[in-house]
Image (cartoon, rainbow, N blue to C red):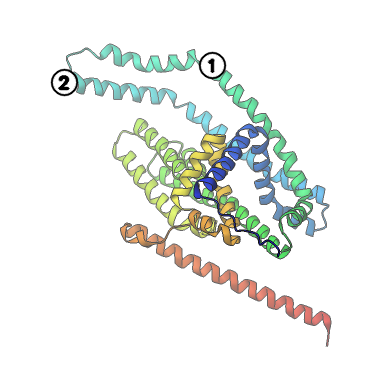
Amino acid sequence: MTDQPKNTYHPWYIKLTFILAMLSLIVYGMVVAKAVLIPLFFAVFFAVLLSPLCGKLEDWRVPRVVAALLSLLLGIGVLVITGIFFYTQIVGLADDASLVEERIRSLLLQFEDVAGAYVDVDLGELVSTIPQNMIGYVTDNVESLSRGVLSAASTLTTFFIIPVYVVLFLLFRDFLKEFIIRAFSYGDEARMQRLIDKVKSVVQNYILGMLIVILILAVLNSTMLWAFGVRHALFFGVFAAMLNIIPFVGPLIGSVLPIFYALLTMDSLLIPLFVLLGFYIIQLFESNLFTPSIVGRQVSLNPLVTLVAIFVGAQIWGLVGMILFIPASAVLKVIFDEFDSLKPYGFLLGKADQSHRKRKSKLALKVQDISERFSERANKMISDTKTEQEQKKQQEQKNTEGP
């Protein structure tokens, strides 16, 4: 008689030990190989974003090498224009340093008058020296600050390899795709092809959708700040919009800076409150209408997982990790949803049920309902377009085949 293989059962603590050991090795590897992995991650995302443009140029009979270089130059041009914009705006903002100093001095003097009625201490000398001490601290530490900037710039030199990676990924994208299919399909090539297409679609929807959302928010933020008379409204509006790429934390930081600046430069205390209310309404539309409709609900992660991804990314790779771990988590969700054994983890990463809707405000519910109706119409239009394209292709095939 042949011996039957026995089913081995591993207790839960053994499985947990293996999982923790694997996660520890992955995190340790990501920390040690930080200088190599960060440029690769950025290059992969940029290459996936530029691949449709590169493919379109190749359809116009442009050689692949030239198409890849032209796509890269276009992306670099956008980054250079953005950098020039922020440089000019920051230079203009620095011209208001004397105005801000005078406003701080005025607020401190008002604080002295109020505090002097309750505290029997002469605060005049202390209050008068605070602005000079603040400016003196900055000037005395220019050298150390410069060293910090230079050290940060030296670490940024590793990102100069990113354009090379992007061009190579664009040139060898078909080769790399074939390698992934051969290495991980396990006989089911159609399934792996479908998974690659989904991951590519998620990354493109996330990056391109976030760029569109940032553009919309920049217009709304700048218009709102300009309407309230806040100086440098364009800079603060674009800055707050770009920080929206970091969920939850970014919008908070982006709104605090213009509110604080309005508090220092505006005579009325109502203006900062109106600015706060304006940012709240814009952010409400962003989270319930713009991002779900433009970026796509497929990329949406629940707030708990998003916050965990942000803080884990910050601990491993710093600010870069906070930015990269969000689309990486969305990619993991797509991969988990494709395999039956991993679907529970994909469910954990996705959006929760809508049982909390009744605890939302009426305005938030109204915006969410508009978003859902807009998404349904957009999905219907996309499906109708695909059906028309398929029918057109079938008709063309029949015409080419002849009677």
Q: Look at the picture and state if 260 lies above or below 71.
A: above
Residue picked out by circle 1: 144
Q: Secondary structure at mark 2?
A: loop
Q: Position of residue 334 (x, y in %)?
A: 58, 57
Q: Position of residue 330 (x, y in %)?
A: 56, 52
CA distance for labels 2 and 1: 40 Å
Residue at left 79%, top 56%? 58
Classify the position of the C terminus by image quarter. bottom right
Task: Select label 2 or label 1 by which is in front.
Answer: 1
Classify the position of the N terminus by image quarter. bottom right
Residue lying furthest bottom in this view?
403
Residue at left 45%, top 58%? 289
Q: Look at the picture and state if 384 lies above or below 187.
A: below
Disc 2 crowd rating (10 Å Cα; few below 14, some 14-19, many 20+) is few
Q: Position of residue 57 (x, y in %)?
A: 77, 55
Query: What's the residue type where badge 2 is placed?
Result: Tyr
Q: Do we see residue 241 in this rendering?
A: no
Q: Do we see residue 178 in this rendering?
A: yes
Residue picked out by circle 2: 118
Query: What's the residue type where badge 1 is placed?
Result: Ser
